Structures are given as structure tokens and as C-alpha cells.
Image: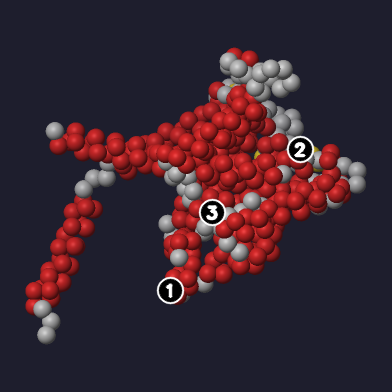
Amino acid sequence: MPDSRSALGVADSAPVARARSAAAASRPNPRRPVTIVAVLAAVLVALAIPLYADRFWLQLGLFAFASTVAALGLTLLLGQAGQLSFGHPFFVAVGAYGYTVLASGPSTAGAHRLGLALPPAVAALAAVLLAGVAGLLFSPIAARLRGIYLGIASLGLVFVGQHILFNAETLTGASNGRGVPAFALPGFRFDTSSQETLYVFGVPFGREEKLWYLGLAVTVAACLCARNLIHSRPGRSLRAVRDRELMAGIMGVPVTRYKAYAFALSSMYAGLGGVLTALAFGRIVPDTFGLDLAVQYLVIVVIGGLGSPAGAVAGALFVAGLPAVLDRYASALPGLAPEGSPGVISPAVAAQLTFGMAVIILLLFEPGGVTAVGRRLRRGADRALVRARRS
């Protein structure tokens, strides 16, 4: 015979739970206004930067945008799906060279260079899809390997890509590289070749200023898409595959299919980052997409925080910006000097040492990265706000 008290307790728990949830929903969330204000302030600052910053900072921002978008793909793959990949530079190269080949015309392709002369917007979209197809082709291997074994297998993509880039001269220009066609939308070009100069609040807008807003728009859209994916049903399925692959399969999650989707999506993000990288450089060479770039992306996601779009932004700003800033101010910083100076540390070496120390410190004290530090500070601010209200 069932216990009447337990039955009464079950019957009473539903109204109590509903009352508690209603009370929790009615209480103001102190984090939401602060978060909204912070995001709006960041967007306004980003929109105003081209009006005041010089070419150095704008170029640095373009590199940060490209690194952020590409790193978003890796942080989704590694942080959400639990798949380790060192082959990200291969897909970035597919996006960069895919856009260059598809958008180049007879006047920009050069001698013995293939160019299909597609509209730049169509070429960019096709390059992203081409990177996604490349990811799908590799996904059967990714679905059957895990951990370091998948990482080593994906590392082979980098060496295969380097061999192709250095030898397919018709497509890539080999070691000489290829010039990147300017991006354009119907009635508007993102370069300075037009006869009429565009002025905004009295500031002449050239190539860097125009590409800044393009990169900002693409980065914001990519972050929003990644955030929506994380909080959606497919995102929960990816985390189930990451945490308990066997249990996810028992619960009905198609594990192999979701692994393939994750790799294809990550490759498309990498391809989009490759398009932005090509536009930022203006000329691409095979050395850009080597093993160093794979390590750079891993540093970005570790420092920023695995699986977090905000962490990809913070990590990309740190990793993409630090070497250039150290190089620019090397003469003013103690112990640093430009490349080639004897007896001192070069900016590139100083940046590498800083990356290494940052990773070690984060792994020791806050493995969750910059985003975990931000959450801890936000919780502390929330507690302080609650205590202030009670007092």
C-alpha cells in the first residue's frame, strides 16, 4: 500500500514548484541589464573606432575579426562536441584560396592563374560552402576517432594542405602567393579604387575602414549563430555526445551524424574566417596556413574558454593583437627590440612567452579561461549588489 504522506507530498510539490518558479521569474535579474549595457557599449565603441583609429589599429582589428570567426568553429568543435582537431588551418586555407580563385577575373588572376570571375559575394558564399564540403569529406574519419587520435589524423590535413598550396601553382601561385580581389556588394566596393572618396563625419573611408564594418558585421552574426546553436536542441545533443557518447546513443542521439555535422559546421566557420583573412591581408601565401596557425587557434580557445563565443572573441583579441602591439612599441618597452637586434628579446619571442605563461596560469588557476574569470567576477558583483540592497 502506498504511503499517503508521500502521495500528499508529491501532490503538494507541483503547486509549490510553480509558485517558486513564478517568484523567481518575477524577481529582477541584476545581470541582465548590466550585460545588455555592456554589449551595447562594446558595439558602439566598435562602430566608432574607424572614425578615430589609424590604419595600424584597423588592420589589427581585421586580423582579430578573422581569427575570432575561425576560432568560433574550433571552440564549437572542441568545446561543444569534444572533438580535438589540429586541421583547422586547412579549412581556413580552403576558404581563403576558394574566395580568391572564384572571385579573380582575367585582370586580377595574373598569368597562368585560374580565376572564375564570380561576383565577390557569391564567391565568398561558395568558398564557405566549399570548406564545409571539405569538412564533410573528412567527417567519416572524425566519426570513428576520438581524442588525441583524431587530433593526429587531422594534423595530416595541414601537411596535405601545405603540399597542395606549394605545388598547385595555377590555383595558389605557389610560394609567390596570389592577390586577393576586393570584396564588393551591388553598388558598393570595399576598396579605394573608386574615383569618389567616401566621407563619414569628415573622415575619409578607405579600404581598412570599409572592411572594418564588414568584419564587425560578420563577426557579430557568427557569434549570434554560435550562441543560438549552443542553447538549442542540437547544441544539447552535441554536449551529450561529448560527455557520454554511449548514453547519448542509447537516448536516441545519432552520434555519427552529429559528429559529422559538428565537423562540417566547424569547417564552414573556418572557411568564413579564411575569407576574412584573405581580405585582411590582400595577398595570401601558403606559409600563412601552416602548423603555427593550428597552435594559434588552440591557444585562442584555451585562453578564451572552451565552448564560449565570448571566449573566442577575447582569445582572438589577445592572440592576434599582442604580437603586433609588442612589435609596434618594442622600442619603448624594456627588454624588447625589433627583429634582428642582438642581445635582446624580439617581439615575436616575447609574444610566444606571454602566450605560454598565460596558458599555464589559466590551466593552474582557472581552466575555464577568460570567460570563467568573467563569470566569477559577475557572480561577485551580483552578491555585492544583493548585499547592498539588503542593507
Residue designated by label 3: 78
Residue marked by disc 2: 283
Mark 2 belongs to which amino acid? Arg
Q: Position of residue 65 (x, y in %)?
A: 58, 39
SS type, badge 3: helix
Q: What residue is rendered at 60% in x and 51% in y?
A: 269
Of discs 2 and 3, which sits in the foreground? 3
Residues under numbered marks 1 and 3 in contact, where contact means CB atoms less than 8 Å apart: no
Query: Left or right: 284 with respect to 304?
Result: right
The image's colouring method is secondary structure
Q: Real-space Cα distance between discs 2 and 1?
A: 49 Å
Q: Secondary structure beneath disc 1?
A: loop
In depth, the one of 97 and 187 nearer the eye is 97
Q: Residue at x 21, y 53 (%)?
A: 24
Mark before the other along the chain sequence, 2 or 3: 3
- Which residue corresponds to the image point at 72% horizontal and 17% vertical from the top-left? 342
Q: Earlier in the sequence, mark 1 or mark 3?
A: 3
Mark 2–mark 3 Cα distance, whole angstroms, equals 30 Å
Picture coordinates of residue 386 (x, y %)? Answer: 21, 38
Which residue is tagged 1?
A: 251
Vertical relation: 40 (above or below) 254 = above
User: Looking at numbered disc 3 in the image, what kind of residue is underneath it?
Assistant: Leu
Q: For the N terminus, which image quadrant?
A: bottom left
